[in-house]
Image (cartoon, rainbow, N blue to C red):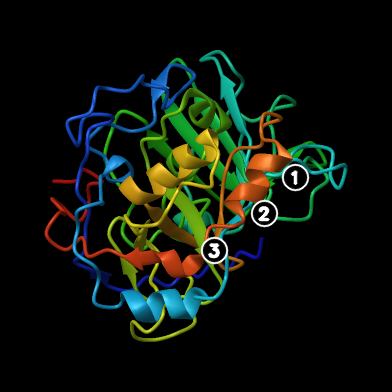
Amino acid sequence: MRRLVGITAVSVLSLSFAVGLPGDARGRAAAPVVNRVGGCPVFPADNVWHADVSKLPVNAHSAAWVKAIGRGYFLHPDFGPSYHAQPVPYGIPVTTVTGSHRKVHVKFHYAHESDKVRYPLGHDTRIEGGRKAHGDRHAIVVDKATCTLYETYATKKSNGHWHAGSGAVWALDSDKLRHDGWTSADAAGLPILPGLLRWREVKHGHVDHAIRFTAPVTSRHYIWPARHQAGSQNGLKYPPMGARFRLKAGFSEASYSHKARVVLDAMKTYGLMLADNGSSWYFQGDASHGWHGKLISELKTIPAKAFEAVDESSLRQSKNSGAAR
Protein backbone atom coordinates (compact mmCIF):
# COMPACT_ATOMS: atom_id res chain seq x y z
CA MET A 1 0.00 0.00 0.00
CA ARG A 2 1.43 3.37 -1.01
CA ARG A 3 1.52 5.91 1.80
CA LEU A 4 2.21 9.62 1.42
CA VAL A 5 2.73 11.70 4.54
CA GLY A 6 2.43 15.45 4.27
CA ILE A 7 3.59 17.48 7.24
CA THR A 8 2.01 20.86 6.52
CA ALA A 9 -1.32 21.32 8.27
CA VAL A 10 -4.26 23.22 6.77
CA SER A 11 -7.52 24.43 8.24
CA VAL A 12 -10.10 21.91 9.41
CA LEU A 13 -13.51 21.91 7.79
CA SER A 14 -16.48 21.84 10.15
CA LEU A 15 -17.89 18.42 9.45
CA SER A 16 -18.66 15.70 11.97
CA PHE A 17 -20.33 12.44 12.92
CA ALA A 18 -23.22 10.97 14.90
CA VAL A 19 -23.00 8.43 17.67
CA GLY A 20 -24.76 5.09 17.64
CA LEU A 21 -24.66 2.70 20.57
CA PRO A 22 -23.68 -0.82 19.57
CA GLY A 23 -26.63 -3.04 18.83
CA ASP A 24 -29.47 -0.75 19.88
CA ALA A 25 -29.40 2.16 17.44
CA ARG A 26 -32.48 0.85 15.62
CA GLY A 27 -34.27 -0.82 18.49
CA ARG A 28 -32.50 -4.14 18.02
CA ALA A 29 -31.40 -6.36 20.88
CA ALA A 30 -27.96 -5.44 22.13
CA ALA A 31 -25.22 -7.44 20.42
CA PRO A 32 -22.35 -9.00 22.37
CA VAL A 33 -19.53 -6.53 22.96
CA VAL A 34 -16.50 -7.81 21.08
CA ASN A 35 -14.83 -4.54 20.16
CA ARG A 36 -12.20 -4.79 22.88
CA VAL A 37 -8.51 -5.51 22.65
CA GLY A 38 -6.66 -6.91 25.62
CA GLY A 39 -9.73 -6.22 27.73
CA CYS A 40 -9.63 -2.53 26.80
CA PRO A 41 -12.38 -0.63 24.96
CA VAL A 42 -11.40 0.57 21.51
CA PHE A 43 -12.37 4.13 22.43
CA PRO A 44 -15.61 5.13 24.23
CA ALA A 45 -19.05 4.24 22.89
CA ASP A 46 -19.67 7.88 21.97
CA ASN A 47 -16.51 8.05 19.85
CA VAL A 48 -16.79 9.01 16.19
CA TRP A 49 -15.53 5.61 15.06
CA HIS A 50 -18.69 4.09 16.59
CA ALA A 51 -21.03 6.68 15.10
CA ASP A 52 -24.07 5.35 13.24
CA VAL A 53 -24.11 7.28 9.96
CA SER A 54 -26.93 5.34 8.29
CA LYS A 55 -29.42 8.22 8.59
CA LEU A 56 -27.13 11.14 7.78
CA PRO A 57 -27.76 13.19 4.63
CA VAL A 58 -25.62 12.65 1.55
CA ASN A 59 -22.64 15.00 1.30
CA ALA A 60 -22.88 17.58 -1.48
CA HIS A 61 -19.48 16.40 -2.78
CA SER A 62 -20.39 12.71 -2.74
CA ALA A 63 -20.53 12.09 -6.49
CA ALA A 64 -17.24 13.93 -7.12
CA TRP A 65 -15.44 12.09 -4.33
CA VAL A 66 -16.62 8.64 -5.42
CA LYS A 67 -15.60 9.47 -9.00
CA ALA A 68 -12.19 10.71 -7.87
CA ILE A 69 -11.45 7.49 -5.96
CA GLY A 70 -12.80 5.35 -8.80
CA ARG A 71 -16.51 4.76 -9.35
CA GLY A 72 -15.89 1.74 -11.56
CA TYR A 73 -13.72 -0.04 -9.01
CA PHE A 74 -14.60 -2.73 -6.52
CA LEU A 75 -13.55 -2.65 -2.89
CA HIS A 76 -10.38 -4.53 -2.05
CA PRO A 77 -9.74 -6.12 1.35
CA ASP A 78 -6.12 -5.27 2.21
CA PHE A 79 -5.80 -8.32 4.46
CA GLY A 80 -6.15 -12.08 4.32
CA PRO A 81 -4.04 -15.12 3.44
CA SER A 82 -0.65 -14.28 1.93
CA TYR A 83 -0.33 -17.63 0.17
CA HIS A 84 3.38 -17.63 1.10
CA ALA A 85 4.04 -14.28 -0.60
CA GLN A 86 5.18 -13.10 2.84
CA PRO A 87 5.78 -14.96 6.12
CA VAL A 88 2.64 -13.59 7.82
CA PRO A 89 -0.94 -12.96 6.68
CA TYR A 90 -1.73 -9.70 4.90
CA GLY A 91 -3.12 -7.03 7.18
CA ILE A 92 -2.03 -4.93 10.14
CA PRO A 93 -1.23 -6.99 13.24
CA VAL A 94 -2.06 -5.99 16.80
CA THR A 95 0.25 -6.77 19.74
CA THR A 96 -0.91 -6.70 23.36
CA VAL A 97 1.51 -6.30 26.24
CA THR A 98 1.39 -6.12 30.02
CA GLY A 99 2.31 -3.09 32.07
CA SER A 100 5.69 -4.58 32.90
CA HIS A 101 6.80 -4.68 29.25
CA ARG A 102 10.06 -2.85 28.65
CA LYS A 103 9.64 0.51 26.90
CA VAL A 104 12.26 1.80 24.49
CA HIS A 105 13.30 5.05 22.88
CA VAL A 106 12.27 5.37 19.21
CA LYS A 107 13.97 7.71 16.75
CA PHE A 108 11.32 9.28 14.47
CA HIS A 109 11.70 10.77 11.00
CA TYR A 110 8.74 13.09 11.66
CA ALA A 111 9.83 13.75 15.23
CA HIS A 112 8.14 17.14 15.57
CA GLU A 113 4.71 15.53 15.01
CA SER A 114 5.34 12.34 16.98
CA ASP A 115 4.66 11.61 20.65
CA LYS A 116 8.09 11.53 22.28
CA VAL A 117 7.56 8.86 24.91
CA ARG A 118 9.00 5.39 25.29
CA TYR A 119 7.17 2.69 23.36
CA PRO A 120 6.65 -0.95 24.45
CA LEU A 121 8.45 -2.45 21.46
CA GLY A 122 10.48 -5.63 21.60
CA HIS A 123 11.10 -9.05 20.10
CA ASP A 124 7.37 -9.82 20.54
CA THR A 125 6.19 -6.80 18.52
CA ARG A 126 4.33 -7.82 15.39
CA ILE A 127 5.09 -5.61 12.39
CA GLU A 128 2.93 -5.33 9.27
CA GLY A 129 4.35 -7.62 6.60
CA GLY A 130 6.95 -9.07 8.95
CA ARG A 131 10.29 -7.77 10.22
CA LYS A 132 11.85 -7.78 6.74
CA ALA A 133 8.93 -6.13 4.94
CA HIS A 134 9.42 -3.13 2.65
CA GLY A 135 5.92 -1.67 2.96
CA ASP A 136 4.30 0.53 5.60
CA ARG A 137 5.50 -1.66 8.50
CA HIS A 138 2.88 -0.40 10.95
CA ALA A 139 3.13 -1.60 14.54
CA ILE A 140 0.11 -1.38 16.83
CA VAL A 141 0.61 -2.16 20.52
CA VAL A 142 -1.97 -2.07 23.32
CA ASP A 143 -0.82 -1.94 26.94
CA LYS A 144 -3.51 -3.98 28.72
CA ALA A 145 -2.67 -2.55 32.13
CA THR A 146 -3.22 1.11 31.25
CA CYS A 147 -5.37 0.73 28.10
CA THR A 148 -2.86 2.83 26.20
CA LEU A 149 -2.55 2.52 22.41
CA TYR A 150 0.86 2.95 20.75
CA GLU A 151 1.14 3.09 16.95
CA THR A 152 4.19 3.53 14.72
CA TYR A 153 4.79 3.71 10.97
CA ALA A 154 7.84 2.45 9.05
CA THR A 155 8.88 0.54 12.16
CA LYS A 156 12.23 -1.21 12.26
CA LYS A 157 15.04 -2.15 14.60
CA SER A 158 18.52 -1.46 13.30
CA ASN A 159 21.86 -1.88 15.11
CA GLY A 160 20.02 -2.41 18.37
CA HIS A 161 17.92 0.76 18.10
CA TRP A 162 14.28 1.29 17.16
CA HIS A 163 13.35 3.65 14.33
CA ALA A 164 10.00 4.73 12.83
CA GLY A 165 8.63 7.32 10.46
CA SER A 166 6.19 8.59 13.07
CA GLY A 167 4.54 7.52 16.30
CA ALA A 168 1.39 8.33 18.23
CA VAL A 169 -0.11 7.43 21.58
CA TRP A 170 -3.78 7.40 22.69
CA ALA A 171 -5.70 6.64 25.87
CA LEU A 172 -8.32 4.13 24.77
CA ASP A 173 -10.86 5.41 27.29
CA SER A 174 -10.63 8.99 25.99
CA ASP A 175 -12.10 10.89 23.03
CA LYS A 176 -9.20 13.35 22.87
CA LEU A 177 -7.79 13.92 19.38
CA ARG A 178 -4.18 14.61 18.43
CA HIS A 179 -2.82 18.12 18.09
CA ASP A 180 -4.39 19.85 15.11
CA GLY A 181 -2.03 19.50 12.16
CA TRP A 182 -0.15 16.47 13.51
CA THR A 183 0.21 13.23 11.63
CA SER A 184 0.13 9.87 13.44
CA ALA A 185 1.07 6.44 12.14
CA ASP A 186 -1.59 7.36 9.56
CA ALA A 187 -1.57 10.30 7.13
CA ALA A 188 -4.89 11.54 8.55
CA GLY A 189 -3.56 11.83 12.10
CA LEU A 190 -6.08 9.20 13.19
CA PRO A 191 -5.55 6.01 15.20
CA ILE A 192 -5.42 2.88 13.05
CA LEU A 193 -6.72 0.32 15.55
CA PRO A 194 -10.39 1.46 15.68
CA GLY A 195 -10.65 1.32 11.89
CA LEU A 196 -9.30 -2.20 11.45
CA LEU A 197 -11.80 -4.88 10.51
CA ARG A 198 -10.85 -7.67 12.88
CA TRP A 199 -11.47 -11.35 12.30
CA ARG A 200 -12.71 -11.89 15.86
CA GLU A 201 -15.56 -9.41 15.53
CA VAL A 202 -16.61 -10.73 12.12
CA LYS A 203 -16.53 -14.27 13.50
CA HIS A 204 -18.78 -13.17 16.39
CA GLY A 205 -21.15 -11.46 13.97
CA HIS A 206 -20.90 -7.85 15.14
CA VAL A 207 -18.79 -4.94 13.93
CA ASP A 208 -19.53 -1.64 15.68
CA HIS A 209 -17.21 0.84 13.99
CA ALA A 210 -16.19 2.47 10.74
CA ILE A 211 -13.52 0.78 8.64
CA ARG A 212 -10.31 2.48 7.55
CA PHE A 213 -9.66 2.78 3.79
CA THR A 214 -7.35 4.51 1.30
CA ALA A 215 -7.60 6.63 -1.84
CA PRO A 216 -4.82 7.39 -4.36
CA VAL A 217 -5.41 11.15 -4.72
CA THR A 218 -6.79 13.35 -1.95
CA SER A 219 -7.45 17.00 -1.19
CA ARG A 220 -5.10 19.16 0.85
CA HIS A 221 -8.00 19.68 3.24
CA TYR A 222 -8.88 17.45 6.17
CA ILE A 223 -12.14 17.22 8.06
CA TRP A 224 -13.05 16.20 11.57
CA PRO A 225 -11.96 13.90 13.09
CA ALA A 226 -8.84 13.89 10.90
CA ARG A 227 -5.98 16.13 12.08
CA HIS A 228 -3.64 16.02 9.10
CA GLN A 229 -3.55 15.71 5.33
CA ALA A 230 -1.25 14.28 2.68
CA GLY A 231 -3.11 15.59 -0.36
CA SER A 232 -1.92 16.83 -3.73
CA GLN A 233 -5.08 18.64 -4.92
CA ASN A 234 -6.67 21.92 -3.89
CA GLY A 235 -10.41 22.25 -3.39
CA LEU A 236 -12.96 19.55 -2.72
CA LYS A 237 -13.25 17.78 -6.05
CA TYR A 238 -11.08 15.20 -4.35
CA PRO A 239 -11.88 13.70 -0.96
CA PRO A 240 -10.20 15.05 2.17
CA MET A 241 -8.78 12.94 4.96
CA GLY A 242 -11.52 12.11 7.45
CA ALA A 243 -14.25 11.80 4.78
CA ARG A 244 -16.84 9.17 5.64
CA PHE A 245 -18.59 6.94 3.11
CA ARG A 246 -21.41 4.46 3.64
CA LEU A 247 -22.74 1.56 1.61
CA LYS A 248 -26.17 2.50 0.29
CA ALA A 249 -29.01 0.98 2.28
CA GLY A 250 -30.58 -0.57 -0.83
CA PHE A 251 -27.51 -2.59 -1.78
CA SER A 252 -28.62 -6.23 -1.90
CA GLU A 253 -26.87 -8.68 0.40
CA ALA A 254 -28.82 -11.70 -0.85
CA SER A 255 -25.91 -13.41 -2.59
CA TYR A 256 -23.45 -12.99 0.28
CA SER A 257 -22.51 -15.37 3.08
CA HIS A 258 -23.35 -14.64 6.71
CA LYS A 259 -19.86 -13.35 7.54
CA ALA A 260 -19.78 -11.16 4.43
CA ARG A 261 -23.14 -9.70 5.44
CA VAL A 262 -21.67 -8.78 8.83
CA VAL A 263 -19.14 -6.62 6.98
CA LEU A 264 -21.78 -5.20 4.62
CA ASP A 265 -24.00 -4.26 7.57
CA ALA A 266 -21.08 -2.44 9.20
CA MET A 267 -20.45 -0.54 5.97
CA LYS A 268 -24.11 0.51 5.86
CA THR A 269 -24.26 1.52 9.52
CA TYR A 270 -20.78 2.87 10.33
CA GLY A 271 -19.26 3.26 6.89
CA LEU A 272 -15.68 3.72 5.75
CA MET A 273 -13.26 6.40 6.98
CA LEU A 274 -10.65 7.83 4.61
CA ALA A 275 -7.41 7.64 6.58
CA ASP A 276 -4.47 7.40 4.20
CA ASN A 277 -3.22 7.60 0.63
CA GLY A 278 -2.99 4.28 -1.15
CA SER A 279 -4.75 2.15 -3.73
CA SER A 280 -8.38 2.91 -4.59
CA TRP A 281 -10.92 1.54 -2.11
CA TYR A 282 -8.46 -0.67 -0.24
CA PHE A 283 -9.87 -1.26 3.25
CA GLN A 284 -7.82 -2.59 6.12
CA GLY A 285 -8.16 -5.50 8.50
CA ASP A 286 -6.00 -7.28 11.04
CA ALA A 287 -3.36 -9.82 10.13
CA SER A 288 -5.18 -12.93 11.28
CA HIS A 289 -4.94 -16.55 10.20
CA GLY A 290 -8.74 -16.67 10.57
CA TRP A 291 -9.41 -14.88 7.29
CA HIS A 292 -10.09 -17.36 4.50
CA GLY A 293 -9.97 -17.04 0.74
CA LYS A 294 -13.72 -17.48 0.12
CA LEU A 295 -14.69 -14.55 2.34
CA ILE A 296 -11.93 -12.36 0.91
CA SER A 297 -13.16 -13.15 -2.61
CA GLU A 298 -16.71 -12.18 -1.63
CA LEU A 299 -15.56 -8.86 -0.23
CA LYS A 300 -13.83 -8.08 -3.53
CA THR A 301 -17.23 -8.01 -5.28
CA ILE A 302 -18.57 -4.94 -3.43
CA PRO A 303 -18.84 -2.16 -6.05
CA ALA A 304 -17.54 1.32 -5.28
CA LYS A 305 -20.53 2.83 -7.08
CA ALA A 306 -22.73 1.50 -4.25
CA PHE A 307 -21.13 3.99 -1.81
CA GLU A 308 -21.96 7.59 -1.01
CA ALA A 309 -20.25 10.19 1.16
CA VAL A 310 -22.23 11.44 4.13
CA ASP A 311 -22.61 14.97 5.52
CA GLU A 312 -21.66 15.02 9.20
CA SER A 313 -21.70 18.79 9.71
CA SER A 314 -24.38 18.89 12.42
CA LEU A 315 -22.84 16.24 14.64
CA ARG A 316 -19.45 17.45 15.81
CA GLN A 317 -19.31 18.50 19.45
CA SER A 318 -15.78 19.90 19.57
CA LYS A 319 -13.00 20.15 17.02
CA ASN A 320 -10.54 18.72 19.57
CA SER A 321 -12.67 15.76 20.64
CA GLY A 322 -13.64 12.55 18.87
CA ALA A 323 -16.93 12.44 20.79
CA ALA A 324 -19.91 12.57 18.45
CA ARG A 325 -23.26 14.16 19.25
Name the residue at 41% across, 27% down: 35
- How far apart, in angstroms, are the residues tagged by discs 3 and 2? 17 Å
**Residue receiving disc 1:** 129
Kindly identify the amino acid type of the residue bearing the numbered disc 3. Trp
The total number of labels drawn is 3
197 to the left or right of 322: right
CB contact under 8 Å: marks 2 and 1: yes
- Does any portion of residue 116 appear in the rendered image? no
Examine the image and state in which quarter residue 57 appears: bottom left
Q: Dot 2 corresponds to which residue?
A: 136
Mark found first going from the N terminus, 1 or 3 = 1
Q: Are marks 1 and 3 in contact (CB under 8 Å)?
A: no
Please tell me how crowded label 2 is: few (under 14), some (14-19), or many (20+) other residues with Cα within 10 Å. Answer: many
- First in residue order: circle 3 vs circle 2: 2
Where's residue 248, x and y in %? 34, 59
Q: Is residue 34 above or below residue 275?
A: above
Report whether 251 appears left or right of 81: left
Amino acid marked by disc 2: Asp
Query: For the point 28% across and 33% down, which residue is it?
Result: 174
Question: For the residues marked 2 and 1, what is the alpha-carbon distance in whole angstroms?
Answer: 8 Å
Identify whether 130 is placed above or below 245.
above
Residue type marked 1: Gly
Mark sitting earlier along the chain (2/1): 1
Residue picked out by circle 3: 281
Label 1 or label 3, whichever lies nearer to me, is: 3
Mark 1 Cα within 10 Å, few/some/many (few <14, many 20+)? many
